[in-house]
Image (cartoon, grey):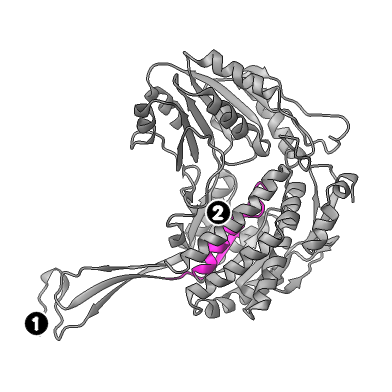
């Protein structure tokens, strides 16, 4: 183990989470299956090997699915509030292990330690939300047009939910799905990102203990590990009625098409190309921290990261100078050190994409205000640390039209009314998160109106990055249209059924149809 890992308590954290040098990557509760092939997990923080996870074989995948489908038949019969009690216990375990799990998230993924803790807190929060929801999975009574009849709508458990998660939120996205799916009576099979597989093993260790303590079927929570070929096993599997997939738009196109071919359901959380509109009345005390954190937080590796600042020409120079000045104060370094603002990108492939994007922006005419590049020297041996860059650009540039998962911020001007800025913001293929900075009520309401932001998330006087558990999370257009977490997002994990009950002595038909014998 590296000096960094030792200094910041990573070894102790791994021990508390049951992580070993080589870990079985396939599990149904307390049963673990080890394949011959392995995935090595290297930390982008210091480039050191954390551990290995074995790859799921076809044979073990079948064992997982057999266990999951069998568990579903039992789990769906347990009353929803009792399922909520299981989720409550899981949330309490997360509270106990928040520190070691948060450290593993930070060390394996590279996000700041505060963000690692914050991600585990999101898991705890969604458990709390799901516990309350377990007593509110309500249908409705519908007036019937026929006398002596009543119509009802009720919701039933869906089945096995397949979850494909991305590296940037290696535990929270899984929890968003599983907490709701579990209270709905579903069981879950999770394929974590091969770039952060140890987090899935840690989470499985935690929930496995809860299932064992409550004498529940192991197949309620399962994990599989491997590359895209393992994911294809799920997307092609008719035993899985719902696939929830988080990742790139390219990945979403493939998953969505494959699941649709077999008439399954897909919940897609894909790319973002998020903008903040800054109007003449915007308060710089709000603009600067919102824009800077949105752009450089998690080293720009959030789907909600701020990619574009659309600034009114009358305040452009003032805002530009303030943002550039703030960037000069950013501290890059070991994310386990809480004095640092920006940690590494996930791997060297991500670094190459970052550098390529900067060169493309320059080639299209972009004016570099803050030069990017790879950070070198002591403490940066992994080769994954980069400098947050700022580039003046045009919205129509090809590189601006695409999401780059890195800390690159594009600045651009708008003139005239706020509608012009909204058109620019909406003028990309993605539609996840958006924000406007203004103290003008009319501008804020136009931004939030039917003709305003076309994104799934639209904020006023806060940035694009981050979301609370209480609201449904997701976006439109090439972001996929899915919704996770709060609000009525639970409905995607259940199947809807309409019932009509005749309590009269006759059989009148709908729409007044006569059928006399």
The secondary element bearing badge 2 is classed as: helix
- Seen in the picture, residue 308 relative to 69 is either above or below; the reply is above
Q: Which mark is residue 475?
A: none
Quarter of the image where one finds residue 98: bottom right
In the visual, does 347 lie left or right of 412? right
The stretch of residues the image draws in magenta is: 156-184
Q: Give the residue displayed 78% in from the left and 40% down from the top.
A: 337
The secondary element bearing badge 1 is classed as: loop
Residue 32 in sight in this render: yes
Quarter of the image where one finds residue 400: top right
Instruction: Count up the numbered dots.
Output: 2
Q: Give whichever of 148, 383 is nearer the camera.
A: 148
Q: Position of residue 224 (x, y in %)?
A: 68, 64
Quadrant where the image shows the C terminus:
bottom left
Q: Position of residue 226 (x, y in %)?
A: 71, 58
- Seen in the picture, residue 208 relative to 463 is either above or below; the reply is below
Q: Give whichever of 394, 58 is nearer the camera.
A: 394
Residue 38 in sight in this render: no
| Residue indicated by mark 1 | 516
Q: Give whichever of 120, 426 is nearer the camera.
A: 120
In the visual, does 277 lie left or right of 215? left
In the visual, does 235 lie left or right of 260? right
Q: Position of residue 487 (x, y in %)?
A: 44, 54
On whether residue 303 falls in the magenta region, the answer is: no
| Residue indicated by mark 2 | 255
In the visual, does 153 lie left or right of 362? left
Q: Position of residue 209 (x, y in %)?
A: 70, 72
Q: Give the residue displayed 54% in from the left and 80% down from the top.
A: 74
Q: Give whichever of 312, 346 is nearer the camera.
A: 312
Q: Residues within 10 Å of mark 1 (few under 14, many from 20)?
A: few
């Amino acid at each position: 183990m590296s000096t960094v890992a030792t200094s910041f308590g990573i070894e102790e954290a791994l021990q508390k989470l049951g992580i070993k040098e080589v870990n079985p990557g396939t599990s149904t509760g307390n049963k673990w299956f080890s394949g011959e092939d392995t995935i090595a997990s290297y930390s982008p923080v210091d480039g050191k090997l954390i551990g290995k996870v074995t790859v799921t074989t076809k044979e073990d995948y079948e064992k997982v699915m057999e266990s999951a489908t069998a568990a579903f038949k039992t789990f769906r019969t347990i009353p929803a509030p009792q399922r909520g009690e299981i989720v409550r216990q899981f949330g309490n375990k997360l509270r106990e292990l928040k520190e070691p799990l948060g450290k593993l998230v930070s060390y394996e993924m590279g996000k700041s330690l505060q963000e690692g803790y914050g991600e585990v807190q999101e898991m705890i929060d969604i458990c709390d939300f799901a516990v309350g929801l377990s007593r509110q999975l309500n249908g409705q009574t519908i007036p019937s047009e026929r006398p002596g009849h009543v119509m009802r709508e009720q919701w039933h458990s869906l089945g096995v939910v397949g979850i494909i998660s991305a590296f940037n939120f290696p535990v929270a996205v899984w929890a968003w799905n599983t907490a709701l799916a579990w209270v709905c009576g579903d069981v879950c099979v999770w394929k974590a990102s091969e770039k952060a597989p140890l987090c899935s093993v840690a989470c499985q260790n935690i929930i496995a203990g809860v299932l064992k303590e409550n004498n529940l079927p192991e197949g309620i929570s399962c994990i599989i590990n491997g590359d895209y070929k393992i994911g294809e096993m799920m997307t092609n599997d008719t035993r899985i009625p719902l696939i929830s997939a988080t990742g790139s738009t390219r990945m979403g196109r493939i998953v969505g098409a494959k699941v649709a071919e077999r008439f399954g359901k897909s919940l897609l959380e894909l790319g973002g190309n998020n903008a903040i509109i800054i109007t003449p009345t915007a308060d710089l005390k709000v603009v600067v921290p919102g824009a800077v954190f949105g752009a450089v937080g998690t080293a720009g590796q959030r789907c909600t990261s701020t990619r574009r600042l659309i600034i009114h020409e009358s305040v452009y120079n003032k805002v530009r100078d303030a943002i550039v000045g703030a960037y000069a104060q950013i501290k890059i370094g070991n994310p386990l050190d809480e004095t640092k603002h920006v940690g590494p990108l996930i791997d060297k492939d991500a670094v190459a994409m970052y550098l390529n994007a900067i060169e493309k922006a320059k080639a299209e005419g972009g004016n570099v205000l803050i030069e990017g590049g790879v950070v070198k020297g002591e403490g940066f041996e992994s080769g994954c640390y980069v400098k947050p860059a700022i580039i003046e650009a045009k919205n129509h540039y090809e590189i601006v039209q695409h999401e780059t998962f890195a800390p690159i911020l594009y600045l651009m001007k708008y003139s005239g009314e706020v509608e012009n800025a909204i058109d620019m913001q909406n003028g990309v293929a993605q539609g996840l998160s958006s924000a406007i900075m203004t103290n003008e009520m009319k501008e804020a309401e136009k931004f939030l109106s039917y003709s305003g932001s076309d994104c799934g998330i639209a904020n006023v006087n806060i940035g694009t990055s981050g979301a609370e558990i209480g609201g449904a999370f997701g976006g439109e257009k090439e972001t996929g249209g899915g919704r996770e977490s709060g609000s009525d997002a639970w409905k995607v994990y259940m199947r809807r059924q309409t019932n009509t009950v005749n309590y009269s002595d006759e059989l009148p038909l709908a729409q007044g149809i006569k059928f006399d014998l």
